[in-house]
Image: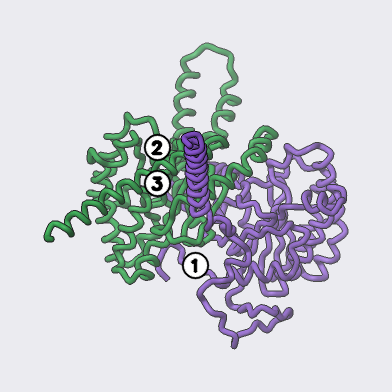
Chain colours: A purple, B green
Amino acid sequence: MIFIHSIIHAKHLQFFTLSTMLSLLCFLLSLLFLLLLPCLRPCFSAKGSLKDKKKIDKGTYVVGEEEPPKGLRRELMPRHVAVIMDGNRRWAKQAGLLTSQGYEAGAKRLIEFAELCFKLGINTVSAFAFSTENWGRHKIEVKCLMYLFQRYLKSKIQFFQSKEIRVSVIGNLAKIPESLLGIITEIEDATKSYKKKHLILAIDYSGRFDILRACKSIVKKSEQGLIREEDVDETLFERELQTKCTEFPSPDLLIRTSGEQRISNFFLWQLAYTELFFSPVLWPDFDKDKLLDALASYQHRERRFGCRV
Amino acid sequence: MAELPGQIRHIGGRMSQLLEQIYGFSRRSLFRVISMGPIPCHIAFIMDGNRRYAKKCGLEDGSGHKAGFSALMSMLQYCYELGIKYVTIYAFSIDNFRRKPEEVESVMDLMLEKIKSLLEKESIVHQYGIRVYFIGNLALLNDQVRAAAEKVMKATAKNSRVVLLICIAYNSTDEIVQAVKKSCINKSDNIEASNYKHEDSDSDIEGTDMENQEKKIQLVDIEENMQMSVAPNPDILIRSSGETRLSNFLLWQTGNTQLCSPAALWPEIGLRHLLWAILNFQRNHSYLEKRKKQL
């Protein structure tokens, strides 16, 4: 009898210990779940930004060369859109292609992107083609990229002329091959008279070096007596940056593809009040719909520039 | 019978204390798990959404900022518990001076009150041994706020455990211009000093070459003269209220910083947003380290 009681008691004890452990585990798991539940939704998603409280006024559709289906307003179009074309190599890997084919697809996408932007009334498009930090990549890859730039720019000179698109290249340009430098000079000369559409390619560009260059230029001018130290302010500084080639040096919208949420030393000064849009899509897949999503998100934003609107 | 409400309150108080202790314990355990991976050295916050929060909750304008301050204290506590050494906050921009004068005045009054409270014994500064820096064009502040800020900086100068950088009357473009001006002045002083040395020395050094070398301003000269040079570049920048822009904050320093923009308004920000940002940072960390080695 005592033996049976002790077995039942032991079984009760085991059951009690097991149930305590299970309930403790459930408690810890539910605490973790409660803490992380809101984070299971992405912090920032391309579509999420469209759920802004502002309602679109359906009466004012854009009527231009290209009629956008999502009800964008021409008067709210950004004047300058910048893009960090990230994800070409990952796209190539996913598609089972070579890296060079990924870059080709990326270049093709850029031309389509720029054309579409100009049709929608955007004046300036700037693209981060090659960063100073990219010199650290494999030599063959860098060589392939330089050759791609050369080939593409050469083949598109007539296209840019026919579409009246001005092309400028900004960057250090000290290390790039002579042949590419020649093509750049040729294309800049051939298109410098066009004013309404401007494509800026940042090749061997770094935001910090741009600022340093502006600083050196200011020092030189002050030594020559062209400016005084007290005249040096933000406006004067901005005029010394490489983006002085455009009427709108500060982008209104920056798009970065492939889901990375960093500036990666692209425009630094110029991005002071730029609306940033991070898309999870890889650059060669960033088609017309994705661009319209980005523009719709931009148009829904309230830009305050530090003050109350 | 009359003692019953008092007893209930007492029990309620004990329960909430117990729950707080359990929560604190679970939080620190979670932090120990997260610390298995790389922890950022420096996090920056743009505390956006205080006014919208006040409007949303039907409070008067100033209360949003007060609620924001409590959220800030919690965030600082979590950061320092996690072992993050540098925290930077965007308290007041030079552009914010263009807001309504009454609003600017009330924010300045609140900041003066809170800056003074940092010196109290029970404040977070003493709890965590925080060294406080005020970064910005302090000449634009009124005398009282500036004096209080300078007092706090002096009083905490010997602390070294963790650092809090408060950007007040700050604009990144202003910081860059001031740094450029300072580097120019320093360079011309150096050239004058070296000219003076060359006149005295008998060596064969070609003075012109040395002058040219010293004259060239380098990246490191600008970096040294940045007010934010007291801290490394931020690893993560969190801007609350869902807006995705930098608003002229740390433009020079955030070239490779991970940007996060949770939708919560600043007074609503919580531990989960911080943890999510850190988990994303850990995900990208190895790739970024590899890239740094390539350079």
In this rendering, the label closer to the viewer, 3 or 2: 3
Spatial CA distance of label 3 from label 2 is: 26 Å
Q: Are marks 3 and 2 in contact (CB under 8 Å)?
A: no
Is residue B223 visible to the viewer in this orientation of the structure?
no
Asked if residue B276 lies left or right of residue A282, the reply is left
Give the number of the disc on residue B23.
Answer: 3
Q: Relative to B254, say whether A2 is above or below.
A: above
Q: Residue furthest bottom?
A: A59
Spatial CA distance of label 2 from label 1 is: 32 Å
Q: In what quadrant of the picture does the C terminus of chain B appear?
A: top right
Q: Which residue is mark 2?
A: B163
Circle nearer the N terminus (3, 2)? 3
Q: Assign a secondary structure to mark 3.
A: helix
Residue A249 occupies quadrant: bottom right
Residue A158 occupies quadrant: bottom right
Q: Are marks 1 and 3 in contact (CB under 8 Å)?
A: no
Asked if residue A146 lies left or right of residue A135, the reply is right
